[in-house]
Image (cartoon, coloured by chain):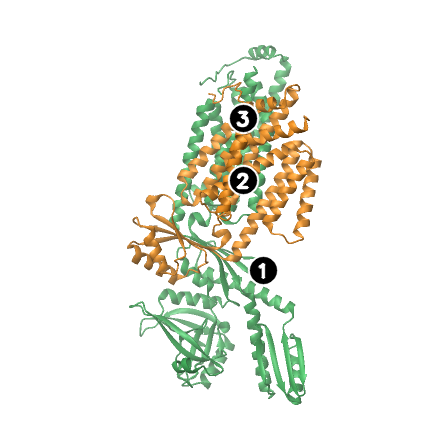
Chain colours: A orange, B green
């Protein structure tokens, strides 16, 4: 069976402006949403606070739960339906780290019974103090930074087959980060700076494949983060893990297509670059769609059936893998084309 | 279509085939021998891996089949509690300073040196003021002889008034802090051991944090209370010069303080707070305890905690009771009065009892913490994650359900799309899952809910490698190659791509493993194991299956 007929020839490069428009629009929406909401929403992992998961025996209204909570001096907490509606589960969240002891649980259960007339089971309590929240932020940022570093080193070496240059990239990147860290800069700023330095190095050294790949990555992460903001979802440690996985995964497709482009450049020395890129994307299209397709299949299963706790994680993967596949075809390759068209040099 | 054509070809037909494809017969045979040789070590390795993985999984399916542990489930799957506590080591320094200044006062009094003031200031400093040359000389002598460890911060002399401020040197405070943290860890470990939790994980995190993981604990609030209590047991005399209510309204006499007794009425559930006026300075503390146990009062049928002191403690207790007959002695735990009985007579032998309106459980917990000893400094709860057992079971069920559904969809899709070759990929995929589970069991890695998600993700990604190979093979076949040549070329050309398309994900996985905590670490573990084993199953195992059909069953047409 063949999903994509052999010899298919879609003009991907020709439609690059449409693709750029769509990507640009998505990124603008993402940024706007982030601005409107005042940055990403942090879960208690990073912001600190308390999370209580309740399960009622029969349906209750959120308003009544809130009444019960205000009797407990928890009136500032938000209450959300958690997971499937018929499970009657709710997530209560406050920004204050509440120390929960025996008296607390007892009186919470009593207050909820009085307010809703329905017994609730406290299924999960998570409390993160501000110090730990800061530590976890640090850990997440370090994880992002090191993934970025290693992946930048890897792709600059791998795509260009210049491991010397990649070593140089690593040295410059680490050197500049070390230099900046002397000024005790916020780690998030440091990561942004590292990203910019990476761009600059790739630009300066004319590492166009690596550059195209990393632009596509930035594109994927930006849109995933934006989607989280638009759907009002919170960032927690698992979400950061999902985003890092997306970075690793979405590079897979890019590596495959770029390898094919290089292979075809050797074969078709006379053809224009746009033709070679189109041909390469078309040749690999079947596997691009199949590999992403099978992965999406399982992620969708996880998204639908995995339950409330894993829901956002699956959502991040879902968005990231979709956008990552799209960006390999419609972002990374056209950028490569644009760059090479500009420098009039083929390699 | 199903089209594995089984053709019992003779050497002759093979030779003809070889000749047709342009090879010399001898080369064909050589190639065959080489392939078979490779085939064999790969086969041995694969079979060994599968057998080992299966053996390690067996205890998870059927516990007790052989003595190895089951796959370790994370707190999010089996329920339980994760706590991070901070030992307030600064408080240990404070109490050391407090103790030193009390010692100093005591010695000065016995040597009849009078002082204007000795007090603890700015948390960890001792300020002393003395009047008169004689006193000053005596004080200086004692300071040099008995308190050499103190560091003098400032000394002001105004005629015959000496003001001196001292503290402990930095190394001393550091070692007090370190010791306090280590002691707290040990004490908490003792308490948890006695509480009875299977496989608790208690360890130091950084300088003064303690990480506690208690899998399977259901009464989490009780466990938390047991861990978090400082459990400082003190015996203090009641100050009977004034009624506590009066002291509350008109002021507490110097040297005394108000402490409360808190009781909950079992019937009305009302909490009653009763004030006591007690003299500051404990006459005896729980540090002399040797044992504590729950007893039942035969008269009222109420549980109480019976405590035993060591020899020194027993002597002190004897002295206290001898000197204070008919006075009231308050038994204070963590600044809460438990009871304040009247001393009827001298008590020797070092036995005492703590009564209060205990439930048997309360009394049992109190006995545990008294036996384990007091924490050298109070602890603060920094992080708490508690998962009820029912939620854990739910998570397992939902995780497994999505794994089954996702996995089945992928299996069906592969078989449908790539026919028999797809089935080969499916077999490799199932081996892959067996290997992941086996590795988790063998290394006692922890499986968490994100870890299950990692396995699910691996299922989707593992067939990617097969897709890469199969698409390559199709391209090669399209160019007119024989199945064997196409498979050889397909694997050869896809190998590098497979390796390095997996490396980037592996980088992410390893970084996450390094920086992740708890559930996220579980994800990093299954993702990393899954990536490695999927490369192995595709490049080695599914290849063996193809080789088997090519060389032994001698298929001529590939079902792809």
Residue underneath mark 3? A15
- Marks 1 and 3 close (CB-CB < 8 Å): no
Residue B9 placement (x, y as % from top left):
53, 13
Give the image location of residue B315, x and y in percent.
Answer: 49, 80
Q: Alpha carbon of mark 1 to alpha carbon of mark 3: how far? A: 58 Å
Q: Earlier in the sequence, mark 3 or mark 2?
A: 3
The residue carrying mark 1 is B207
Q: Secondary structure at mark 2?
A: helix
Name the chain under label 3.
A
Residue in the image at 47% along x and 30% along y? A293
Task: Examine the image and state in which quarter residue B483 appears.
Answer: top right
**Which residue lies under the disc numbered 2?**
A221
Q: How many marks?
A: 3
Q: Position of residue A151 (x, y in %)?
A: 61, 39
Circle 1 chain = B
From the viewer's perspective, is residue A150 above or below residue B6?
below
Q: Mark 1, mark 3: which one is toward the viewer?
A: 3
Q: Where is residue B204 drawn, in percent x and y?
A: 55, 58
**Residue B253 seen in the current view:** yes
Q: CA distance from mark 2 to mark 1?
A: 36 Å
Q: Nearer the viewer, residue A82 or B260?
A: A82
Q: Are the numbered discs 1 and 3 placed on the same chain, yes or no?
A: no
**Of residues B459 and B440, which is closer to you in this image?**
B459
Q: Is residue B489 left or right of residue B389?
A: right
């Amino acid at each position: 069976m063949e999903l994509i007929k052999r010899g298919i020839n879609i003009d991907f490069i020709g439609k690059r402006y449409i693709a750029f428009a769509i990507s640009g629009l998505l990124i603008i929406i993402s940024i706007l949403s982030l601005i409107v909401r005042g940055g990403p929403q942090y879960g208690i992992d990073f912001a600190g606070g308390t999370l209580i998961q309740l399960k009622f025996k029969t349906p209750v209204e959120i308003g009544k739960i809130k009444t019960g909570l205000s009797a407990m001096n928890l009136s500032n907490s938000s209450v959300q339906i958690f997971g499937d509606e018929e499970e009657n589960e709710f997530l209560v969240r406050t920004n204050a780290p509440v120390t929960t002891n025996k008296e607390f649980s007892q009186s919470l259960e009593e207050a909820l019974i009085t307010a809703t007339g329905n017994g609730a089971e406290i299924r999960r309590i998570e409390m993160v103090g501000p110090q730990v929240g800061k530590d976890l932020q640090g850990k997440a940022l370090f994880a992002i930074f090191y993934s970025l570093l290693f992946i930048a080193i890897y792709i600059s070496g791998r795509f260009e087959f210049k491991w010397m240059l990649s070593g140089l990239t690593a040295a410059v990147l680490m050197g500049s980060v070390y230099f900046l860290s002397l000024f005790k800069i916020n780690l998030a700023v440091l990561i942004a700076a590292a990203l910019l330095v990476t761009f600059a190095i790739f630009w300066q050294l004319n590492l166009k494949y690596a550059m195209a790949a990393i632009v596509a990555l930035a594109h994927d992460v930006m849109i995933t983060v934006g989607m989280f903001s638009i759907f009002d979802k919170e960032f927690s440690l698992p979400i950061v893990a999902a985003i890092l996985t997306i970075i690793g995964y979405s590079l897979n497709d890019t590596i495959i297509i770029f390898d094919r482009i290089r292979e075809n450049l050797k074969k078709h020395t006379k053809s224009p670059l746009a033709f070679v890129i189109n041909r390469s994307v078309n040749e690999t299209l079947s596997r691009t769609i199949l590999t992403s397709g099978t992965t999406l299949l399982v992620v969708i299963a996880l998204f639908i059936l995995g339950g409330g706790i894993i829901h956002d994680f699956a959502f991040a993967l879902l968005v990231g893998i979709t956008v990552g596949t799209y960006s390999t075809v419609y972002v990374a390759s056209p950028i490569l084309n644009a760059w090479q068209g500009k420098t009039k040099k083929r390699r | 279509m199903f089209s594995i054509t089984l053709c019992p070809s003779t050497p002759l037909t093979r030779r003809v085939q070889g000749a047709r494809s342009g090879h010399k017969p001898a080369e064909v045979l050589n190639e065959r021998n080489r392939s078979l040789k490779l085939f064999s070590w790969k086969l041995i390795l694969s079979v060994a891996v599968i057998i080992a993985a299966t053996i390690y999984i067996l205890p998870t399916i059927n516990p007790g089949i052989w003595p190895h542990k089951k796959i370790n489930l994370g707190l999010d799957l089996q329920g339980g509690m994760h706590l991070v506590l901070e030992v307030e080591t600064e408080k240990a320094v404070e109490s050391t300073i407090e103790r030193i200044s009390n010692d100093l006062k005591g010695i000065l009094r016995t040597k009849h040196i009078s002082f204007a003031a000795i007090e603890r200031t700015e948390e960890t400093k001792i300020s002393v003021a003395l009047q008169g040359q004689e006193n000053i000389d005596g004080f200086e002598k004692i300071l040099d002889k008995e308190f050499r460890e103190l560091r003098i911060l400032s000394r002001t002399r105004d005629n015959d008034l000496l003001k001196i401020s001292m503290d402990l040197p930095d190394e001393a405070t550091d070692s007090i802090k370190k010791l306090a943290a280590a002691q707290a860890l040990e004490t908490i470990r003792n308490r948890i051991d006695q509480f009875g939790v299977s496989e608790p994980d208690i360890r130091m995190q950084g300088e003064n944090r303690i990480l506690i993981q208690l899998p399977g604990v259901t009464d989490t609030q009780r466990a938390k209370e047991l861990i978090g209590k400082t459990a400082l047991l003190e015996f203090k005399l009641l100050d009977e010069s004034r009624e506590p209510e009066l002291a509350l309204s008109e002021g507490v006499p110097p040297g005394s303080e108000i402490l409360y007794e808190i009781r909950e009425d079992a019937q009305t559930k009302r909490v009653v707070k009763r004030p006591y006026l007690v003299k500051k300075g404990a006459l005896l503390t729980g540090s002399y305890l040797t044992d504590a146990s729950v007893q039942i009062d035969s008269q009222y049928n109420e549980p109480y905690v019976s405590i035993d002191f060591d020899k020194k403690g027993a002597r002190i207790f004897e002295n206290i009771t001898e000197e204070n007959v008919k006075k009231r002695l308050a038994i204070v735990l963590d600044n809460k009065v438990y009871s304040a009985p009247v001393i009827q007579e001298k008590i020797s032998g070092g036995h005492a009892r703590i009564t209060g309106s205990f439930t048997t459980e309360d009394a049992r917990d109190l006995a545990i913490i008294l036996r384990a000893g007091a924490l050298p400094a109070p602890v603060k709860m920094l992080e708490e994650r508690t998962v009820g057992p029912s939620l854990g079971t739910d998570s397992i069920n939902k995780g497994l359900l999505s794994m089954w559904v996702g996995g089945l969809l992928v299996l069906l899709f592969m078989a449908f799309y790539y026919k028999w070759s797809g089935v080969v990929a499916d077999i490799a995929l199932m081996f892959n899952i067996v290997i992941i589970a086996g590795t988790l069991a063998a290394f006692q890695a922890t499986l968490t809910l994100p870890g299950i998600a990692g396995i699910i993700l691996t299922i989707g990604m593992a067939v990617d490698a097969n897709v890469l190979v199969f698409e390559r093979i199709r391209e090669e076949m399209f160019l007119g190659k024989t199945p064997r040549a196409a498979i050889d070329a397909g694997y050869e050309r896809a190998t590098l791509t497979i390796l390095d398309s997996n490396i980037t994900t592996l980088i992410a996985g390893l970084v996450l493993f390094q920086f992740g905590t708890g559930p996220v670490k579980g994800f990093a573990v299954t993702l990393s194991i899954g990536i490695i084993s999927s490369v192995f199953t595709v490049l080695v195992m599914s290849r063996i299956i193809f080789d088997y059909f090519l060389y032994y069953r001698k298929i001529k047409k590939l079902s792809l």
